[in-house]
């Protein structure tokens, strides 16, 4: 690789080495300390007033404001009629982010609406320990809201700094892996690269293990651009692996997976 010296001359620079982790032994998930439970109470704000006569207009105003921020995960109506006023919002933002948006725009929050928020992210996207091991972190920045919950799975690996998915029982074709915003990467005490739940700091699995995630779900906005991603890791198909958890971790928590039921006949 060539680069320019401070004097503008071309000089040869050594290629940087990135990590590869194709397989890893599962840690003893049963002995890991349980993460602090999420304080769901702090993620809800109840209505504390009766809806005013112009509640429908107020709800539509707030819907347009929040859609402009691209943070609406859903909303509830005050009645069964589709023409009913909005009673509350479910948002893909934290309480603090909501308060900052309200202050920045000088909005008055209506007391008759209820609010539901996303948990704060307490772990970084990429830890300092893992930063030099990877070429790019392929994860969205928009928070994940409601999603499909069918199970998908496969082995998530790291090769030369890029993340790949090897399908369970597949034909050997690999896809580049892309993650939701709530997943980060770190290195554990034994030197293995791990996926982390950014809402709790919990270890979700070591790269090289078999993982399970909710599917099928789209790639959400934010994160590296397509051009940056392709320049770093190539032109393989891209698979959304969401917020994955190692199958060994799931079995440690919930017990072994049942054998598949054969089709009738």
Image (spheres, rainbow, N blue to C red):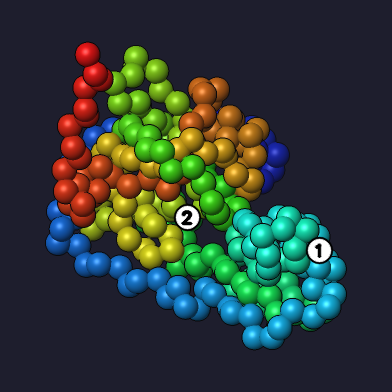
Sequence-first disc among 2 and 1: 1
Residue at 63% over, 48% down: 222
User: Is residue 216 something one can see in this rendering?
Assistant: yes
Percent of width and height locating residue 147: 51, 46
Give the structural element (helix, strand or loop) at label 1: helix
* Mark 2 closeness class: few <14, some 14–19, many ≥20 residues within 10 Å: many
Residue at point 79% right, 80% down? Answer: 52
Q: In the rendered view, would you say 19 is above or below 253?
A: above
Q: Position of residue 178 (x, y in %)?
A: 49, 39
Which element carries disc 2, helix, strand or loop?
Answer: loop
Measured as percent of width and height from the top left, residue 155 is found at 31, 33
Quadrant, the C terminus: top left
Residue at image position (33%, 40%) is 212
User: Which of the labelled discs sits on residue 60, or is there none?
Assistant: 1
Which quadrant of the view contains residue 153? top left
Q: Is residue 94 left or right of residue 187?
A: right
Spatial CA distance of label 2 from label 1 is 30 Å
Q: How many marks?
A: 2
Mark 2 or 1, which is nearer the eye?
1
Specify the label residue 182 is tagged with: 2
In the displayed structure, would residue 204 be above or below residue 119? above
Within-10-Å neighbours for mark 1: few <14, some 14–19, many 20+: few
């Amino acid at each position: 690789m060539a680069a320019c010296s401070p004097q503008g001359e071309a000089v040869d620079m050594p290629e940087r080495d990135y990590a590869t982790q194709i397989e890893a032994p599962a840690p003893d998930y049963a002995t890991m300390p349980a993460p602090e439970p999420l304080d769901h109470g702090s993620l809800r704000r109840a209505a504390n007033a009766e809806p005013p006569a112009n509640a429908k207009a107020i709800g539509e105003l707030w819907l347009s404001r929040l859609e402009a921020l691209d943070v609406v995960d859903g909303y509830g109506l005050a009645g069964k009629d589709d023409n009913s006023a909005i009673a509350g919002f479910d948002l893909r933002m934290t309480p603090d982010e909501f308060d900052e948006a309200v202050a920045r725009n000088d909005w008055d929050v209506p007391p008759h609406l209820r609010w539901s928020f996303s948990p704060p992210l307490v772990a970084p996207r990429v830890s300092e320990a893992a930063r030099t091991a990877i070429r790019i972190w392929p994860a969205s920045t928009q928070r994940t809201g409601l999603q499909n919950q069918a199970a998908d799975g496969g082995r998530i690996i790291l090769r030369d700094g890029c993340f790949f998915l090897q399908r369970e029982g597949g034909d050997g074709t690999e896809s580049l892996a892309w993650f939701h915003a709530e997943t980060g990467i770190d290195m554990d005490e034994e030197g293995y690269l791990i996926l982390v739940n950014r809402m709790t700091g919990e270890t979700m699995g070591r790269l090289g293990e078999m993982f399970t995630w909710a599917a099928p779900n789209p790639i959400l906005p934010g994160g590296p651009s397509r051009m940056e991603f392709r320049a770093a890791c190539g032109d393989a198909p891209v698979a959304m692996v969401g917020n994955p958890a190692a199958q060994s971790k799931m079995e440690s928590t919930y017990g072994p997976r049942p054998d598949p039921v054969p089709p009738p006949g």
